[in-house]
Image: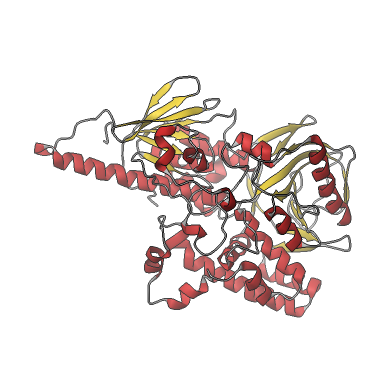
Amino acid sequence: MDHTGGRVSARVAVIGAGIGGLTSAALLAARGCDVTVLEKEAWVGGKARRVLVDGAEVDGGPTVFTYREVFDEVFAACGARLDDHVKVARAEVIARHAWDARGSLDLYDDPERSADAVGAFAGAEAARGLRAFMREAQRIFEVLEDPFLRGDKASTPLPMMWKIGPWKIADMLAMRPFDRMWDALGEHFRDPRLQQLFGRYATYCGSSPFAAPATLMLIAHLEARGVWLIEGGIHALARALATIAERQGARVRTNAGVAEVLTAGGRASGVRLASGEVIPADIVICNGDPSALATGRFGEGVRRAVPSIPPAKRSLSALVWYVHSRTQGFDLSHHNVFFSTDYPREFREIGEGRPPSEPTVYVCAIDRGAGDKAPPPSGRERLQIIVNAPANGDLRHYSPEERERCTHAMTATLKRCGLTLEDPLEHQLMTPEDWEGLFPATGGALYGRASHGWAASFQRQGPRTRLPGLYCAGGATHPAAGVPMAALSGQLAARVIAKDLASMKTFRQAAIPGGMSTPSATTGNMG
């Protein structure tokens, strides 16, 4: 599949080595561009990193890997195979869920096995509800995959609806953009625990199930199609993307923070590093939250290139513990969720700007597989533990006392569900304040703009900005947050850039007598 159009040539500077930036870098390098990726940290992968705790390297960042065909396509476009660069295994158990210490509920990669498990947990009516829910989630995904997830950014639903086909009214209504996710789930599940379980998928986009559209139910279908475990975590995937980009001729530089995007002649012309080094470029891709551009973090010349995101529209942030500990009690799988007893209160507290007093807790047991039985490692094991939190890290200071309160609230949920960790706990904790330090101008929001309301998905930043030559990619841009969606954004950015470069080449050739083109100080040689 050709994701970038024909072969093109230009100098490209990519700010940030996250999944979206590395994807666009690899694809554009494969098409002949001279690509330099500039990452301010010492690692590639952005949020997907490794954290040293008690002598152990704990995988950080995203943990759930779905929609793997997107990455198969990216690697194939670079003449490579995903399986030759990372070790990937399909998870038998998608996730293990608990509400108390009386038992747990597994969802499986086999939908019928999941339905049987739900039936045993909550009754035959709940099993029927799950089957109906999964049919609806599949239909939403199938309606939206080509025109939206893989399509161009649209500022209103109309272009997408035209692609779907105005005669397919039933398909348009199937997207349920005007229904709240929580209400739609109530149509399928009378058991509030199941409503809570599937409502949690809204948080994959950094959103509240009480404000997100029912459209996000499609995430359940993505997981049902397959969840994959990568040896070394998503960080290993990022390193593999960097490797194939470099094999196509791209340069990936770490510890190379960009201080300013330069402009000339009304378009982006390169970047200036914090060190003072200037890197000329015809194309600049910002693989970061667009808020960094809008707040002037990359200079006044590009502040107006993208609209700003009001703090009230930010996605969720998170409290993330990187842990090395012995565990007792609960039989962990690889992915585990321990639910709060009052989901509405949890999101109400987050909406009021407070970390939840009794949080839902996600635990990734890094050293365990994802089968029915995942035997614990001998001794301590590595855990990444995540709790949703408000994105006000630019306003709220997390004192040692508050950090301790948050840790106590997290471990209390685990204990209520039967899981005990060591005390004292060997860990590092990232708060919204810490995320703001790592990703400035976001308040610690980890998913860009929240998907609240029917129009939110169309308000995400697309690949093009108001400044010619400056583009965006990453999980904070179209189509959505998450590892595969960030890669789709990188594909889209590469495709749009190739199209724009080809248009510029055609224009320049037509504008010069005899059809000859000449290089320009601001556009470079377009091939």
Indicate the position of residue 269 as horizontal and vertical percent values: 35, 31
Indicate the position of residue 362 as horizontal and vertical percent values: 74, 52
Q: Residue 381: tell me if it is visible.
A: no
User: Nearest the camera: 392 or 415?
Assistant: 392
Indicate the position of residue 497 as horizontal and vertical percent values: 35, 44
Q: Residue at (56%, 58%) from the top-left corner?
A: 451
Identify the colour scheme used: secondary structure
What is the quadrant of residue 498 in the picture?
Answer: top left
User: Nearest the camera: 370 or 163?
Assistant: 163
State the residue lying farthest toward the left.
514
Please state the total of marks drawn on the protein image.
0
Seen in the picture, residue 492 relative to 299 is either above or below; the reply is below
Q: With 69 as the anchor, is 107 left or right in this view?
A: right
Q: Residue at (49%, 62%) from the top-left corner?
A: 455
User: Nearest the camera: 418 or 110?
Assistant: 418
| Quarter in which the C terminus is drawn | top left
Q: Residue at (50%, 19%) from the top-left corner?
A: 275
Indicate the position of residue 20 as horizontal and vertical percent values: 50, 43
Q: Residue 190: tell me if it is visible.
A: yes
Q: With 99 as the anchor, is 262 left or right in this view?
A: left
State the residue lying farthest toward the top.
276
User: Nearest the camera: 42 or 451?
Assistant: 451
